[in-house]
Structures are given as structure tokens and as C-alpha cells.
Amino acid sequence: MFSFFVSFVACALLTLLVIKYAKRNGAALDSDYEGVQKFHTHAVARIGGIPIFLAVLFSGAISTLRELTLGPWLASLIGCAFIAMAGGILEDCTGRVSPGRRLLLTMLAALLAYYLLGAKLVRLDLPWGVLPLQLNLLVLPLTVLAVAGIANAVNIIDGFNGLASMVSICMLLSLAYVALQVGDMYVLVTALIVAGATAGFLIWNYPVGLIFLGDGGAYFIGFMLGELALLLVMRNPGVSTWYAALLLIYPAFETLFSAYRRMFVRGKSPALPDGIHLHSLIFRRIVQWTVGPREARALMKRNARTSPYLWLFSLMAVIPATVFWKNTGLLIFFSLLFIISYLWLYARIVRFKSPRWLFLHNKKRK
């Protein structure tokens, strides 16, 4: 856990410095309060990805001094992740980088990792055996799309204070645990470093939202999640490929379902943002009724109360994935169970039939 705590302390301090710098200089502040996915009422720095990346870089250097063989591997991975993050950071600072260009950069980063680290999807585990994937014309695009998709998916769920961060921390700790079980030191140390940095950021982001993760932070964490999950599974045949699928299913399915909803239900581009993600519906149709409408302080309070719903919901996937990491049959079962649960919950909330147990208390609106 040494790597986790070094990264945690480094990021906590760096994030505080970034907050003070952004406020003093008015740099990269999110002052758009009218967007469909905007729930804050004052300007907030949205460059949380910068201290997270710097903390990972610093902690990676410390870990390399303790274990020299880790250096080249970690440097290659962080270098690829920087490319994935770059488009997001530019968007955070300028607001002029389109989603398509950001996606292309994450795909380029995944392509480099494919060649530099051998991070490629070469098999699919099934209950009755293993399906090898050997055709490069198939493996290359599948790998690139999978990793880039996860990076984008973490950005999709980054809608409320602490939501994407805490979900990612749980996933990273799961990766570290399974890596420990199979003796994969590289994935273990890297997962702890990224989890520690994300936790150091989280203490300033949740609950009061002094800084936002931003597109850069979401792409960086999402890319690292996708690559670490892929590398862990492919480097260790004892870990089922369905472990990675179940572990990442919440952000992945949220993204796929959002694309389906926008294209086939609403007839719009899948790249256009909307305000009816699951976390947005929970905010508007559950949390606001339990807290009641007030001024800016109350808005922050409702924002902070939204994320724990999704933390618990994501654990429906993370916990069974961690427990049954080598049992393909059970992992497939829990993947299907999660999808069914998601669709059921979404349908109930969108039809104003939210389960009563989701309401923490019934406070009448004033």
C-alpha cells in the first residue's frame, strides 16, 4: 500500500495548489451553469486531471526507484495515457476540442499501447472453453475500440461530485486485489498508484466540489482502467476475460445505452449530451424530492447525495467481479443480472415509478 499512500498525499497537495492557482488566475474555470449536465452554481476549476497525472508520474518514479524493472513498462503506459488525456485537458482549458477529436486521441493512445505493451485482446473465455482471437484485422480494432470506449465511458459517468472518482477507485482496488492473487506486480503497483491519486483528488471534489475531474482527468483514469484491465486479463490466463467485462460494466453499459437512446429513441447524434443519464434521473426524480429545492447550498447538498446511489449500484458489479474473478460462468451471470437491473431501474425512474426504498426520507417540498 506504500504506492497508494505516496500517490494519495502527492495528489492531495497538488490538487490544493491547482485549486488556489485556478481561483487566483481564473484559469480553466467551468462557469457554464445552463448545460443539460451542469449542476453547479459557481465557477469551479475543471482541470483535476493535471494533479492526478502529476501525482501518478511522481509516485511512478518513486516506485521505479524501489523496483527498477517497473520503470520501462510504467513509463510506456503513462506516456500512452498522456496522449489520451491531452485532448481532454485542451478541452478543459479552451472548450474547443470536439468529442470526435478526443476519441481519436484515445484511440491513438490505445494503438500505441497495443504495440509498446502488447496490450491486445487475444482471447475470449467461455463457460465451455477459450475462444482464441488471432486475426490481427480483428484483434487490433477490437482492442483499440474497447480501450477508447472505456476512457470515454468514465467521462460519460462524470456527472456529479465524486461519482466517477469513487467508482474508479473501487475498480482500481479490485484490479490491485486480483493482480495480487495472480502475482502481477506491474498491474498491482500501477493500479494502487492511480487509485491513490484519484483518492487524493476526491477529498477536494466530494462533497463540496472545489475542483472537477474534467475531461482530461476522466480520459486519463478511464484509459488507465481499460489498459490495466486488459493487461491483467491477457497477461494472466487464470483471470477470466469476463472479470474485466463485469468490472467495467457500469460505465460501459451506461455509454452503450446512452448511444442507443440518443440514436434510436430520440433520433439524435450519439455525441450530443443529454440530461437523462441514470445519474441525472436519480438527481432530478429522487434526490431533489428527499432534500427539497433551496438556494445554491441546497443544490450542492443534492449533488453530493446523488453519487452514493451510483456508488452502491456499481458495487453490484465490482464485488462479484472481485470475488469470482476466475469463474467465467458466474461472471457472465452477474453481467446479465447487472444489465437487467440497470434497465429495470432506469425504466421505473423515467416513468415516475421509482421504488420507494430509494427515497431516504420523505420531506415535503416548500
Image (cartoon, helix red, strand yellow):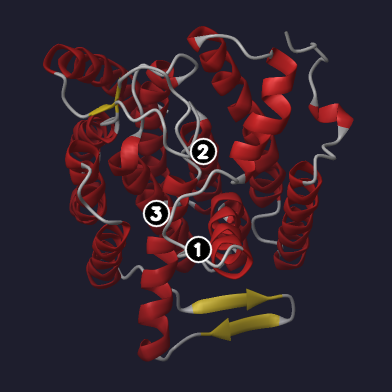
Badge 1 is on which residue?
Answer: 233
Q: Secondary structure at mark 2?
A: helix
Q: Residue furthest right?
A: 356
Q: Residues within 10 Å of mark 2 (few under 14, many from 20)?
A: many
Given the image, on which type of amino acid does mark 3 rest?
Ala
Res. 50 in view: yes
Q: Secondary structure at mark 3?
A: helix
Q: CA distance from mark 2 to mark 1?
A: 15 Å
- The x, y position of residue 206, in whole percent, is 47, 19
Foreground label between 3 and 1: 3
- Of callouts 3 and 1, which one flags the residue occurring earlier in the amino acid sequence? 3
Near mark 3 (Cα within 10 A), the count class, few <14, some 14-19 or many ≥20, is many
Query: Which residue lies under the disc numbered 2?
Result: 173
Quadrant of the image containing the C terminus: top right
- The structure residue drawn at horizontal position 53% and vertical position 9%, both measured from the top left corner, is 295
First of labels 2, 1 by sequence position: 2
When the figure is inspected, residue 328 is found, relative to residue 12, above or below; the finding is: below
Q: Which mark is residue 151?
A: 3
Dot 1: element: helix
